Image (cartoon, rainbow, N blue to C red):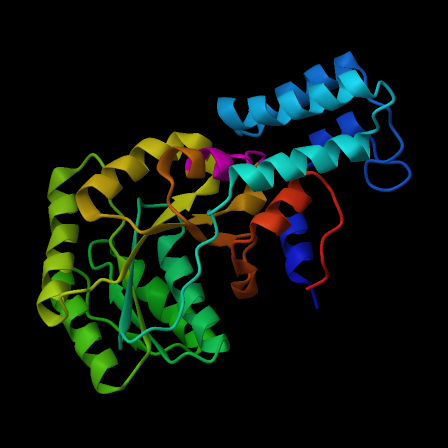
Amino acid sequence: MKTLFSRFKEGLKRTTPTFYSILGEGGGIFGGKTLDASSIEELEEALYGADFGVETTSRILEEIRSAFQKEKELRGQEAARIGAAVLRQTMEGAEGRLQPNEHVPEVICLVGVNGSGKTTTAAKLAHFFIGEGRTTLLGACDTFRAAANEQIKSWSELLEVDLVASHYGADAGAVAFDAYQAAASRGREILVLDTAGRLHTKGNLMEELKKIRRVLGKLNEDAPHHSWLVVDGSLGTNSIEQARVFHRDFGLTGLIITKLDGTSRGGALAGIFHELKLPIYFVGLGEQPEDLQPFSVENYANAIFGLAGEET
């Protein structure tokens, strides 16, 4: 069985090899290589290439260069530890944690553009909460895309998640209403709502999303309790603008970053958090249901820089 850290390490494997080659792998993951000015320049390029952004990259390099000035025999593993420590500091407050509260059901609304993995993530998220012992219901409010109902029904059957759905072209607000009523009558703790993927530049589709919020608000003035944007991690920091628009129009409370296993731009998490200051609740580190994991700054920083992680 994979540990939580090993999932992070495996999921970020396309980001880390460049750091390995620069900092060296002998004698421990980074222990055998002594840094020089050239390797620090290479590291700078690699950090930018991984989409860490200007501020995070500058902070990491500043600390490593300072250590290098004091110790010319600075080894790769020491530099990796410095980089991971700075990354942890930079991402302080980035971990989103869903705590049990008095809301029944507690409504989580997932939004995002087509192709972000939102519908699959909705089913995996419901499955995760069930695994945590929390009664959960899934609502299929993506009635705009023809294949969405079939996709989420297939996942709900595979993962044994109860689903409330309608048909292609149905009113998404009506489905949200039915899903909330079903969750409330069955005493479910959590209701996860998938919504139609939409371009953040399409005003009519954003209005439809606002309608779902209004419908839920009439049932419970605090609903949705959580509005999470599902972001395709392979887009890197290019996704920041779409996030800003969703935040403006829908009021985001958090993020889920998907498809990190398919990108070399794993540093984008730091850039996205720095720009938006929205907590990251989950990350997608692979295709399997169990590869959707709660975000951990510690595991993220250690996996990026190839340090040993706790076997949890």
**Residue 219 visible in the displayed image:** yes
Q: Is residue 49 above or below residue 138?
A: above
Residue at x 11%, y 42% (from the top left corner): 204
Query: Is 218 colored magenta in this rendering?
Result: no
- Drawn side of residue 85 relative to residue 219, left or right: right
The x and y percentages for residue 238 are 40, 30
Front position in the image: 171 or 79:
79
The x and y percentages for residue 298 are 62, 50
Q: Is residue 277 above or below residue 118?
A: above
In the picture as drawn, the residue positioned furthest to the top comes out as 37
**Residue 17 visible in the displayed image:** no
- Drawn side of residue 267 relative to residue 30, left or right: left
The x and y percentages for residue 165 are 24, 71
Magenta-drawn segment: 264-272
Where's the N terminus, which quadrant? bottom right
Front position in the image: 173 or 78:
78
- Drawn side of residue 308 relative to residue 258, left or right: right
- Drawn side of residue 167 relative to residue 300, left or right: left
Residue at x 82%, y 30% (from the top left corner): 24
User: For residue 216, what is the image quadrant?
Assistant: bottom left
User: For residue 68, what is the image quadrant?
Assistant: top right
In the picture as drawn, the residue positioned furthest to the front comes out as 70
Front position in the image: 111 or 52:
52
